[in-house]
Amino acid sequence: MIDECDLVGDGVADGVIGDPLACDFDFTSLVGQVTPCGETFTDADAAVLEKIRQGPRRTSGEFQWYGLVEGAPYAGLSNTALVNGELVGQPFPFVTLVIAYWLEMNPAWDWRTETYESFEQHIDQMVELYDDVHGASDPDIRAFHDSGGKLLVWHGWSDFGVYAQGTLDWYERVQDILGPGRTKQAVRVFLAPGVDHCGGGPGAQPTGQLEALIEWVEKGHAPKQLLATRAEGGSVVATRPICDYPTVAKYKGSGDVNDAQRYRCVPAEQLTPRMDP
């Protein structure tokens, strides 16, 4: 998948998809290939991966939330392990613990009893019970904007716990209320290709976020890009710009591909489609 879409967005073959939304990988192209585990990839495998990319849907087929983008790791969400000679599933523990303790109120709840129907209900239940407590999806920031507030948001595209599309969905809703111009006065969003939850992953890691915010608040210089670095053995081996959404970093075509100065910010090929719950 990454090989197929490696040049998308940034134009550089570096093992990181620069603009994941512009990658539309066909999982069925893997059918018949032998995996590193020695198993043959099947149509059923392709269907599972497509459902993961698609994200949760109601039993009626309606959108419920987003799924993993191309390039994000799958292993953290759905692992397997050999237990007494039997291959068993090991789902992401955060999800199973939340359902057991926060929703079912039963520490002994068995995740293997979950169905499509009950999962749909659990998502709705989570929103109903806890969105007012710690939800972060309210797009009405008019008071924040009017008071002169500035918000710098960055999100790793390879975050497998909190999907970046949710951040973009929120940002689009902010624009619906404030309009694009006023939104830009208060909010800037930066998406880091190949970066996991709060950091890590193969992508260049964002730096200088606080300094950029201070420069914006105190001097009125809104950030158009952040500098990201990739280190090996404690030394920086590559730098990249992380561009202000909806632009992405693209290689200029000459010079050192590991030098941020050799990239420019250009409009993204594909913006996140709004999928209202």
Image: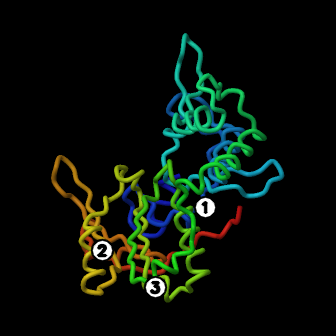
Judging from the image, the colouring scheme is rainbow
Q: Is residue 31 above or below residue 244?
A: above
Q: Position of residue 245 (x, y in %)?
A: 46, 75
| Placement of the C terminus among the 4 image quadrants | bottom right
Nearer the observer: mark 2 or 1; the answer is 2
Q: Position of residue 174 (x, y in %)?
A: 56, 76
Residues at discs 3 and 2 in contact (Cβ within 8 Å): no
Residue type (three-letter) at the residue carrying disc 3? Asp
Element on which disc 2 rests: helix
| Label 3 crowd (10 A; few <14 / some 14-19 / many >=20) | few
Q: Is residue 131 left or right of residue 113?
A: left
Residues at discs 3 and 1 in contact (Cβ within 8 Å): no
Residue type (three-letter) at the residue carrying disc 1? Asp
Residue type (three-letter) at the residue carrying disc 2? Leu
Label 3 vs label 2: CA separation? Answer: 18 Å
Which residue is under mark 2?
213
| Label 2 crowd (10 A; few <14 / some 14-19 / many >=20) | many
Of the pair 248 and 214, the residue shown nearer to us = 214
Which residue is under mark 3?
146
Element on which disc 1 rests: loop
Residue lying at 25% horizontally and 67% vertically, measured from the top left: 208
Label 3 vs label 1: CA separation? Answer: 40 Å
Which residue is under mark 1?
24
Q: Position of residue 69 (x, y in %)?
A: 55, 56
Nearer the observer: mark 3 or 2; the answer is 3
Q: Which quadrant of the figure has residue 223?
A: bottom left
Tally of numbered discs: 3
